[in-house]
Image: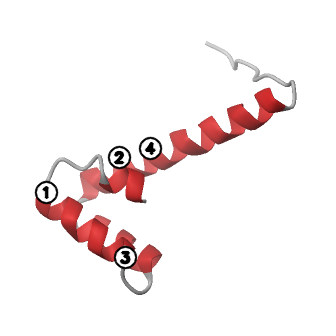
């Protein structure tokens, strides 16, 4: 969440996200703040998905495995 907040161009929104992360109930508050900015919420989901894929690719590589390309 902190890595994403650092990419937010709107300083006020970035500040609200940073405060949400460092307060009580960080997950709930972070998502509540993003609910007020639908475009950033979509961007966060894409950001989080790509980070998960990166971790999976790294794990596969560490274990000598590769990924399979799906159709066109």
On screen, residue 39 above or below 30: above
* For the residues bearing labels 1 and 2, Cβ distance under 8 angstroms: no
Residue 28, x across and y down, in percent: 43, 78
The residue under the point 35% across, 46% down is 43
SS state under label 4:
helix
On screen, residue 43 above or below 28: above
The span from disc 1 to disc 2 (Cα, nearest Å) is: 16 Å
* For the residues bearing labels 3 and 4, Cβ distance under 8 angstroms: no
The residue under the point 49% across, 49% down is 48
For label 1, the residue is: 11
Quarter of the image for residue 55 reads: top right
Label disc, if present, on residue 43 of the rendered structure: 2
Label disc, if present, on residue 46 of the rendered structure: 4
The span from disc 3 to disc 1 (Cα, nearest Å) is: 17 Å
On screen, residue 44 above or below 26: above
The image quadrant where one finds the C terminus is top right
């Amino acid at each position: 969440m902190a890595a994403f907040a650092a990419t937010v161009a709107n300083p006020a929104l970035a500040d609200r996200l940073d405060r949400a992360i460092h307060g009580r109930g960080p997950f709930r508050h972070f998502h509540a703040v993003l609910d007020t900015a639908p475009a950033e919420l979509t961007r966060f989901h894409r950001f989080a998905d790509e980070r998960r894929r990166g971790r999976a690719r790294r794990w596969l590589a560490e274990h000598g495995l590769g990924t399979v390309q799906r159709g066109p």
